[in-house]
């Protein structure tokens, strides 16, 4: 039997029930020697590379341990009855949380925070998605300059434009109002949506719109049935970024908020630096409430979107249509 007939013989033998026949070389799966290659790459790395890797990991672990210890200290002090010069508090109580909720009027503060965050997220998406679509699809002179202007609030510190903006808002009667706080937080939030959605839309095939037009879909039907399902992951990711940024936005809210329009982060600042004697346990309790609410909102948002899978979802979406 010739060499060319051996693969055919092996195939015929397998069809006749002789499964003990040695398979042909063409049918053997190719296996990549991943482990030996990894070991060889590690051997090629010099002592300098290993030292640098150890320094980076050591710095990361040191940072995380310090942050964890600080949070643990604040959390423990918020439950402590008395803690002076001892490794652990003398006792634990929930009294400071009740006192912080009552003294700082946290029910009203949380409601204002919810109103501001909800309004900023909705308005940012409603205004940012059409702007991102226009920047992604239209070609016009000065497009890069327009993109730069949109992204300026992200590159400039909020204090730089926050004071002039607050001055204007107070002159037109919006300073200290809920609408003024929402407008101030909208300035840096809108560029976030444009920054996320513009490359997202650019990856969507423009031929989908042409195909929808051929089959008689108007603009509303195209947006509802074709474009919107593809944009949902990007919109959720942009909304998550805006939500996190708005919760922690201190400067612009501090400049434009009044006594009845303070968000939680501004109320926490006033609790720490206001006049009068306050128990540190009460302030720590308020800080823990702020951190718990922020983490809760972020965890709820992460149930609907995974930002790390943003690009992969865009690329896979047209294939599934």
Image (tube, rainbow, N blue to C red):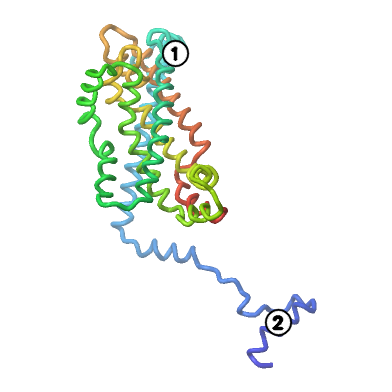
Q: Which residue does the image show at 40% across and 15% down from the upper left?
A: 109
Could you say which is closer to the camera, residue 193 or residue 171? 171
Q: Residue at x 34, y 10 (%)?
A: 279
Q: Pick the residue in front: 294 or 204.
A: 204
Q: Residue at x 24, y 18 (%)?
A: 170
The answer to which image quadrant residue 97 occupies is top left
Disc 1 residue crowd, few under 14, some 14–19, many 20+, Cα 10 Å: few
The residue tagged 2 is 10
Residue 40 x %, y %: 41, 66
Around disc 2, counting alpha carbons within 10 Å, would you say few (fewer than 14), some (14 to 19), or many (20 or more)? some
- Quarter holding the N terminus is bottom right
Q: Residue furthest right?
A: 16
Regarding residue 72, the answer to whether it shows in the image is: no
* 1 vs 2, front mark: 1
- Position of residue 78 in the picture relative to residue 164 (left or right): right
Q: Residue at x 34, y 43 (%)?
A: 58
Q: For residue 254, what is the image quadrant?
A: top left
Disc 1 target residue: 107
Pinpoint residue 301: horizontal percent, then vertical percent: 48, 33
> Vertical placement of 268 versus 4: above or below?
above
Of callouts 1 and 2, which one flags the residue occurring earlier in the amino acid sequence?
2
**Residue 86 coordinates in the image, percent (x, y):** 37, 17
Task: Mark 1 and mark 2 in contact? Answer it, CB < 8 Å.
Answer: no
Q: Position of residue 154 (x, y in %)?
A: 28, 38
Quarter-of-image position of residue 265: top left
71 and 16: which one is in front? Answer: 16
Disc 1, SS:
helix
Is residue 9 found left or right of 94 in the rendered image?
Answer: right
């Amino acid at each position: 039997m010739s060499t060319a007939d051996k693969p055919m013989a092996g195939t015929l033998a397998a069809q006749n029930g002789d499964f003990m026949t040695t398979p042909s070389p063409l049918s053997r799966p190719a296996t990549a020697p991943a482990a030996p290659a990894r070991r060889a790459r590690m051997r090629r790395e010099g002592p300098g590379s290993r030292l640098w890797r150890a320094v980076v990991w050591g710095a990361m672990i040191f940072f995380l341990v310090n942050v964890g210890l600080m949070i643990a200290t604040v959390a423990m002090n918020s439950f402590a009855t008395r803690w002076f010069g001892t490794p652990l508090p003398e006792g634990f109580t929930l009294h400071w949380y009740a006192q912080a909720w009552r003294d700082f009027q946290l029910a009203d503060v949380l409601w204002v925070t919810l109103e501001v965050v909800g309004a900023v997220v909705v308005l940012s998406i409603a205004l940012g998605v059409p702007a991102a679509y226009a920047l992604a699809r239209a070609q016009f002179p000065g497009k890069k300059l327009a993109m730069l202007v949109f992204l300026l609030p992200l590159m400039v510190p909020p204090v730089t434009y926050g004071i002039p903006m607050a001055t204007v808002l107070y002159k037109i009667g919006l300073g200290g109002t809920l609408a003024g706080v929402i407008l101030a937080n909208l300035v840096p939030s809108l560029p976030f949506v444009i920054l996320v959605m513009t490359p997202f839309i650019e990856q969507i095939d423009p031929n989908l719109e042409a195909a929808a037009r051929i089959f008689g879909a108007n603009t509303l039907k195209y947006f509802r049935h074709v474009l919107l399902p593809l944009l949902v992951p990007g919109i959720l990711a942009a909304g998550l970024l805006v939500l996190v940024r708005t919760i922690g936005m201190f400067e612009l809210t501090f400049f434009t908020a009044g006594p009845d329009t303070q968000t939680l982060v501004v109320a926490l600042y006033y609790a720490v630096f206001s006049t009068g004697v306050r128990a540190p346990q009460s302030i720590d309790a308020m800080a823990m409430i702020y951190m718990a609410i922020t983490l809760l909102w972020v965890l709820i948002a992460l149930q609907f979107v995974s930002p790390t899978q943003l690009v992969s979802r865009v690329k896979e979406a047209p294939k599934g249509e």
